Image (cartoon, rainbow, N blue to C red):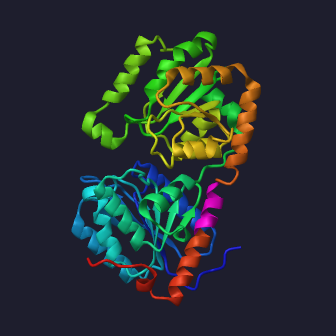
Amino acid sequence: MIAKPPSAAPVVYISTYPPRRCGIATYTAHLAAAVSATGTLGPGLVVALEADGHRHAYPQTVIEVLPSHDLPAYLRVADRINRLGAALVSLQHEYGIFGGEAGEYVLSLLRRLHMPVVATLHTVLARPDPPYRRVMEEIAAQAVELVVISRAARDILQQVYGVNPRRITVIPHGAPQPDPQRRRAVRRQLGLQGKIVLCTFGLLSRGKGIEYVLEALPEVVASFPQVVYLVVGQTHPVVRSKEGESYRHELMAMVERLHLEGHVQFVDRYLSESELIDYLLATDIYITPYPGDQQVSSGTLAYAVGMGKVVVSTPYPYARELLGDGTGVLVPYRDSRAIARALGALAASPEIRRELARRAALRGAGMGWHQVGKAYARLFTRVIADAGTSSVAAARPVSPA
């Protein structure tokens, strides 16, 4: 049971937020709702980061909209949070959503706040360039506690950035817990009866490694013509603004060149949460073929494991952590032949798929959003209580503005 903190003042989340289409936005909406559902803290309010030239219609819980590249706005928002008397700020940090070099504008906001900050770090770079190291080191100094989604990220914070492990908490990425009894009806609704369904979902961009799966498929479908691969999600808005749909068009050209037209489906739109859950329910084998090794978290992988899916993945740190003990299948980076062998073996054996699904369900049992909300609520409650017995200035070092 979580004890109530001594203050009913609000918790303020600083993040992107729905309806903005962003994985951090979705995460924050689930987190705020899960913490609120514990009933142990004051109301959850949001400062929503906006990209230049955009303005979404936000719900009433959003008290401020922060243009990410407007430095004076960061100071105004900090003053507003101070006047509000917030008990705690939950900063959701990801590279690319804050303005300035390496996202440095957020530092001006943190230096100005009068209450404790808990920073959730969605990306922790193991080999940071100097500007990224500087920003991460100051966020770590300004925050009272740091939350990471994986043990790999915790280890990097200790070894690369010198953070005291007592200030780091590992809380799993949350995942939905849908009703598996709906699977048959969903597959019928999506026209996937009788198929072995492979799936990758998320905002599309280069660096996802989809091309390596496509190169593997001809060998797989030659033996298992019932295989279909779903590439679910629209192109990332930032990518689309810079290079249009060039990556998707390259993938579609590969499908044609490899004669995979009947085996690959692109679902080119941003899915609602319920639609995404349906596609995952319909999936037999989830694939994360990322070609790089710095991924210390992945919301898509968390969702797949949390929903008990069989997973084939490259061995980036978060995948090793979730799957490396036999919970899933790990294949080398950029190795289409290895992907083909793994998919072929799984397609040939429903028994192996059932066993891996069972293991994934066991691993994902602690990843429901209600459990994540309880873990955050316990952390927030402790930080608020500690702040009540010592000054925030003593709790966290504050650099000059």
Q: Quadrant of the N terminus?
A: bottom right
Question: What x and y, as percent, mark residue 93?
Answer: 41, 60
Determine if residue 85 is in view: yes
Left or right: residue 187 versus residue 112 is: right
359 part of magenta stretch = no
369 part of magenta stretch = yes
Question: What x and y, as percent, mark residue 285?
Answer: 62, 30
Q: Which region shows up in magenta? A: 368-376
Left or right: residue 359 versus residue 50 is: right
Question: What x and y, as percent, mark residue 320?
Answer: 58, 43
State the residue at coordinates (27%, 73%): 75
Q: Quadrant of the C terminus?
A: bottom left
Near-viewer residue (128 or 142): 128
Compared to residue 227, the image places residue 127 above or below, namely below
Near-viewer residue (87 or 141): 141
Near-viewer residue (384 or 277): 384
The part of the image, by quadrant, that contains residue 74 is: bottom left
